[in-house]
Amino acid sequence: MAVISHFIDSFSFIFSKIFQESVVPEDWRNANVTPIFKKGQRSLASNYRPVSLTSLCSKSWNPSLETVLLII
């Protein structure tokens, strides 16, 4: 439980700083787009769908931001 508490405290601190300074870390704003094959000929780009791989911190940030915006 101490480890979880430490992570919660750390994320709370980071999220508070982001709100105070209005700056989201660069890595959180980037995504790696990976093409995933659907079906058909592999040589046709239309047979792939893009999947965005984002940072875990970014995924945690989005619900927090939504909660704060609903409060405001």
Image (tube, helix red, strand yellow):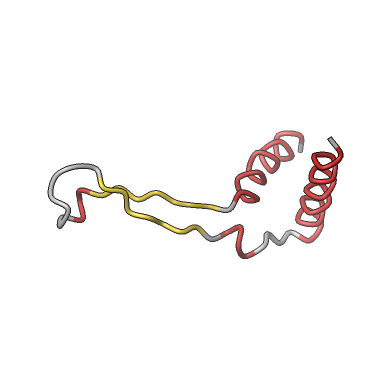
Q: Quadrant of residue 20?
A: bottom right
Q: Is 46 situated left or right of 29 in this image?
A: left
User: Residue 31's x, y, as percent?
Assistant: 50, 57
State the residue lying farthest toward the bottom: 26
Q: Is 4 situated left or right of 30 in this image?
A: right
User: Residue 50's x, y, as percent?
Assistant: 35, 50
* Residue beneath the point at 15% across and 57% down: 43
Q: Is residue 43 above or below residue 65?
A: below
* Residue beneath the point at 61% across and 49% down: 56
* Residue beneath the point at 14% across and 44% down: 40
* Residue beneath the point at 84% across and 40% down: 5
Q: Quadrant of the N terminus?
A: top right
Front residue of 71 and 53: 53
User: Residue 47's x, y, as percent?
Assistant: 20, 48
Front residue of 72 and 1: 1
Q: Quadrant of residue 44?
A: bottom left
Q: Quadrant of the C terminus?
A: top right
Q: Is 20 situated left or right of 23 in this image?
A: right
Q: Quadrant of residue 22?
A: bottom right
Front residue of 66 and 37: 37
